[in-house]
Image (cartoon, rainbow, N blue to C red):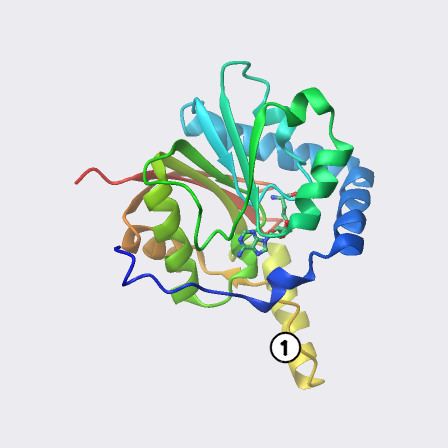
Amino acid sequence: MNDQQKTSVHLPFSDKYTDSHSQEYFQKHNEKKLSDRMEHRMAQRALALAGHPSSVLDLPCGTGRFWSMLAQDPKRELLAADYSEAMLEVARKTRDPALVGRFRLLQCSAFEITLPDDSVDCIFSIRLMHHIGESSNRVAMLREFHRVSRDTVVLSLWVNGNYKAWRRRKLEAARRQRGEKSDNRFIVPRAQFEQECRQAGFEVVGHVDFLPRLFMWRAYVLRKKSI
Ligand SMILES: C[S@@+](CC[C@H](N)C(=O)[O-])C[C@H]1O[C@@H](n2cnc3c(N)ncnc32)[C@H](O)[C@@H]1O
């Protein structure tokens, strides 16, 4: 995609990560020990499926929840980006300075990454795609990942085909009936998302589920299709 074809997407949920919300996000995840460990395990298995990439862009990095894991390989080149300067600031302040020093930090949107084409081996994107409700916006983000990654993408989102998704659909229907607004988090049918990945120029290498058939979180591993 050239610059003229590119349209910048801005989603209202992106503005909620203020100073206070960023602190709360850090605290909340710091306390959820078991689910945090399981999510790390899911991400680690997905990175292995991606071939243990030697350069990784963590986008959105949030408060740096995955930095220790990503930095376990001492030779890995590490970059981290987030739309929210407040989230980046919490990461800088709360993580070990030696760990922070391993990362090149950028403030930018995942729809408009301030890096040249083919900058990293892998884009690692945890807990962003489930906030994107429109198919055209998901494809726009995937296309931007395709531009910046040389090889793979690891990303997590909520998919259908499990107990939690079935339960959430019922809760969403009840919410709509009461006239309540969406909480800006969406379940995407697996087949539809995989089609969107292909549309953006990726093949699906595989996936890792948080807890198969029970939970909605799935990490996909995508590889750029050879032309
Ligand atoms: C649920 S948090 C996930 C952060 C981190 N990956 C984690 O799992 O802890 C969502 C993050 O997306 C960031 N964000 C929101 N809109 C964004 C955008 N358009 N581009 C990049 N980051 C965005 C927020 O600032 C926030 O840090």
Residue visible at 72% across and 24% down in the picture? 97
Quarter holding the C terminus is top left
Percent of width and height locating residue 45: 52, 29
Q: Nearer the viewer, residue 129 or 77?
A: 77
Residue 37 relative to residue 112: left or right: right
Residue drawn 65% across the image and 44% down it: 62
At 55% across and 28% down in the image, what residue appears?
44
Q: Which residue is mark 1?
A: 173
Front position in the image: 108 or 46:
108
Instruction: Identify whether 155 is placed above or below 195.
Output: above
Q: Is residue 212 above or below residue 199?
A: above
- In this rendering, position of residue 128 left or right of residue 121: right
As helix, strand or loop, the secondary structure at mark 1 comes to: helix
Q: Quadrant of residue 90?
A: top right
Tell how many labels. 1
Q: Position of residue 150 (x, y in %)?
A: 32, 34
Asked whether 117 or 212 is in front, the reply is: 117
Residue most extreme to the top: 74
Name the amino acid type tagged 1: Ala
